[in-house]
Amino acid sequence: MGDTRSLNVWPLVGRTAALRGITEAAAREDVRGVVVVGPPGVGRTRLAREAVTALAAAGHRTAWATGTGAAGTITFGALLHLVAMEEVATAGYVFGRLVERLSAPGGRRPVLVVDDAHLLDDASAALVHHLAVHTTTFVLLTLRPGRATPDVVTALWKEQVARRVELEPLGGGDVDMLLERALGGQMDAVSRRTLRRLSAGNPLVLREVVRAGLERSALRRVDGVWHLAAPVEVTGRLGDVIEEQMKADDPVVRNVLEVLACAEPLGQPVLEAITGHAAVVQAERQGLVVVEPSGLRHQARLAMPAYGDVIRARMPRAQARAIWRQLAESLATSAHLRADDALDLAVWRLNAGLDSYAPELLAGAERAAERLELGIAERLASASRENGGGVEADLTLAEVLALQGRYADAAAVLPTRERCDGKATTDRWAMLAEKIEYWSQEDSSDPGLPAGERAAEAVRAWALLLEGRVKQALQVGTALLARPDPELAARATVWAATAVTLAAGLVGDIALAERASAIGRDVAHTHRTVLPWGPVQIGGARCLALMLSGDLAAAATAVESGYREAVETEAAPLVGAWASIRGIVAKAQGRVQLAQEALREAVVLLDGYDALRFQQLYMAELAGTHALAGDTIQAETWLDRVDGMPPAPGVLFDWWIDRNRAWTAAAMLDLSGAANLAIEAAKAARVGAPAIEALALFDAVRFGAAGDVCERLKELAAETPTPTTAAFVAAATAYATDNARQLTEAAGALRDLGHLLPAAEAAATAYRLHVREGRRTAAKNTLALARELLAECGRARTRLTDLTGSEASLTPRELQVAKLVAAGLSGRAVADRLGLSLRTVNNHLGRIYVKLGVSGRQALADVLGQ
């Protein structure tokens, strides 16, 4: 069971403006009160408590009362605790005593808070109105909309005696902030969106869902990332909170909610056919159901998805089966207009215990696979096979298993090629056979040159690429793309285009990468329904090609767009795949904090979805981000995990992984070992990946081996002329010759290409050289550039980012003055402590600012702190 103690104090988020509006209103004599209106759980009471705390701290006398159903049956029932009475008194006596107590003069104006004022009895409501209109008392009331409210309370905001504040559910950004503050750490994007959706921005529901998730360990921290690993189980507490909010006591309304809990969204005609039109209208009127247009028809859904979880958990099983039976029968007799109709029909029939037909089950399995709901897809495909689904069911199940990386299981169900007839079926079989044979590193169930050879060639292009045979991969892939074949399977075209795009990036041919990615992007977009992985395959390959060819700025822009689109789908594997690419690009830039967050998210979301065996790569990249931040313990921990995994096929990523080993060695101050590792990685990549070779050689430059690799870098730049190789050569030459001016120029070129950390390192090195030679103006300018670039790199700390030369450039007396001023002492206090005149201190301070290139005490403190 998880620890839920931190949820006892839930942070107040998204209510700053409302809170400020209340406190400002209390300070104005012409405003007599504020009425806060909002649905249950939205935070009316919490806002009122925060407001009364702030007003009490400002000197206001405050009183709190709460309206309840029971107190509403007693005259002044909600307010009696505010006045001491020794004997039974008349209503008039109580009224007078309360007015006297709540509006007594002295100090700042008194404040009366009444929570749930719609439940007040008439006498209490009249008293509140009297206090607001005829005394100096400031009244703060909370109301639940849609409930009968005493007319005198309503009159307060209608007659503009008090201001009305509408409290809406929290927006997505506020929910994310609330989760981060409450849990004290990063949460993956899919889990955040799931919790947003379940709570519909309702803070109370959000808190209770999170609490239930922690209690049952559905919500847990994995590798530093909060992750909703399973559906939230409905606890007694969560169920009671939701039931209290719904208050669905009317049986006909309850029936509507139960049907939607089994299947939402649901077409309005289908829902009304089962429950009746009047019931749907009543449920919508109570705010429990939303009916909204969807294309040419209207759909109904629950106002808050968490309602569905609670209703399903507490619904009798027999009732749920009866509803699924009605839904299945209704859908079976209607025209299938939605893409998900086939999936819904198959699942509903299974849930209802009805006989299912192989074609229906197969159609449902195919749609589930398209939605990357692989568990459901496997269940339906298996059921279709058992019901005589034939070769199509076998192929679909094998594809689903292969998507999960379960190649041995896929091989076991893959049909023989003799059973495949027709080009489409043969192509599917050929691609599957090729994948199983390569990624399982075992012979397929049907070895030999497969039928559907051109489709299999697309997979073979990928295999060649992973084996480091980049030129051959380009030949195979470009041959497929160069010969338009309308009969070539769309998935084969996407695989070929992806291989060519990445291979072109490895050899520095960005023009070819763009052409190939454009072909693949068009096909993937046209068939995105049946090829859910298509956009991330081709889009991710393009981002990596841009990164490898040196245009990191364009790669970063493209990856952010792809990542945002994936998050909208809430499909964990798609988000995880984009997160891995996002982290790799951010690390290449030197944006260490973003890279760590993205790569940790990828590790969590891609657990169980590593069909292409990329896990070692992004874990090694995560180790590299920690090395760049100087965290050797975490860097070694992640590399140990990489080494403990089964080796991935091919050698392509070995070069990439070895660069991270080099950075880990550098973080441990073994610069000689780091340089040797980087040079060895460069030699291994020389066989066909000049982009990787250039990156590895430049790593060696940054480890202090510029003189050893500069000539090879120049040769490589001549063989593969790109803006990046040119920038690397310029920087390496400047490092080898300790040329500060050339380093500054190199920093600018690297920055323009998006290499932020290498640019910062070059600028910092130039600064140190200028200081050593006494060039103060140049030092000041390069120091400012280095600080600006390091600010974009977050937690990055390498040996070349060292700016301690700032202090070394000061005389002992200047350093003494600088540290005292940075500690917060005034100029006069520094003068008194050091026995100097104020004028002398100011002169020292002026020279300090010039030497360090800063202005102001805070900037000085930042420099000395760094």
Image (cartoon, rainbow, N blue to C red):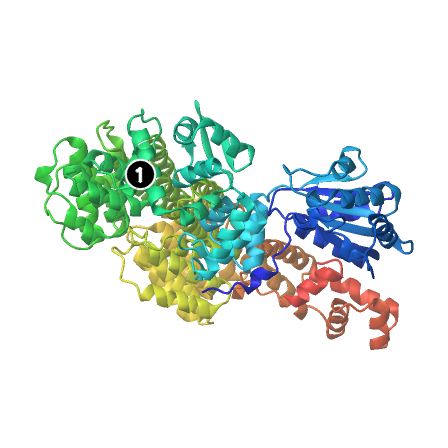
Left or right of 284 in this view: 79? right
Q: Is residue 137 left or right of residue 494?
A: right
Rendering coords of residue 262 (x, y %): 39, 40
Identified at 48% across, 46% down, the residue is 306
Rendered position, 800 above or below 459 = below
216 to 667, vertically: above or below: above
At horizontal 72% and vertical 45% (from top left) the residue drawn is: 120
Q: Is residue 543 visible?
A: yes
Q: Residue lying furthest top in this view?
A: 296
Taking the view exactly as shown, the residue that stands out farthest to the right is 106
Q: Check disc 1 and report the residue beneath it.
A: 348
Quarter containing the C terminus: bottom right
- Find numbered disc 1 in the image and state the secondary structure of the residue it sits on: helix
Image-quadrant location for residue 311: top left
Q: Position of residue 378 (x, y in %)?
A: 25, 46
Sort mark 1 into few (<14), some (14-19) or many (20+) by Cα contacts within 10 Å. many
The answer to whether residue 107 is left or right of residue 253 is right
Residue at position x 52%, y 46% from top? 199
Quadrant containing the N terminus is: bottom left
Q: Is residue 686 visible?
A: no
Residue 246 versus residue 838: which sits nearer the camera?
Answer: 246
State the residue lying farthest toward the left: 418
Viewer-side residue, 13 vs 212: 212
Give the residue at x 48% y 36%: 253
Q: Tell me how many marks there are.
A: 1
Relative to 191, say whether 161 is above or below.
above
- Three-letter residue code for mark 1: Trp
The image position of residue 291, as x and y in percent, is 49, 30
Judge by depth and name the residue closer to the eye, 63 or 38. 63
Tell me where residue 755 appears, x and y as whole percent: 50, 51
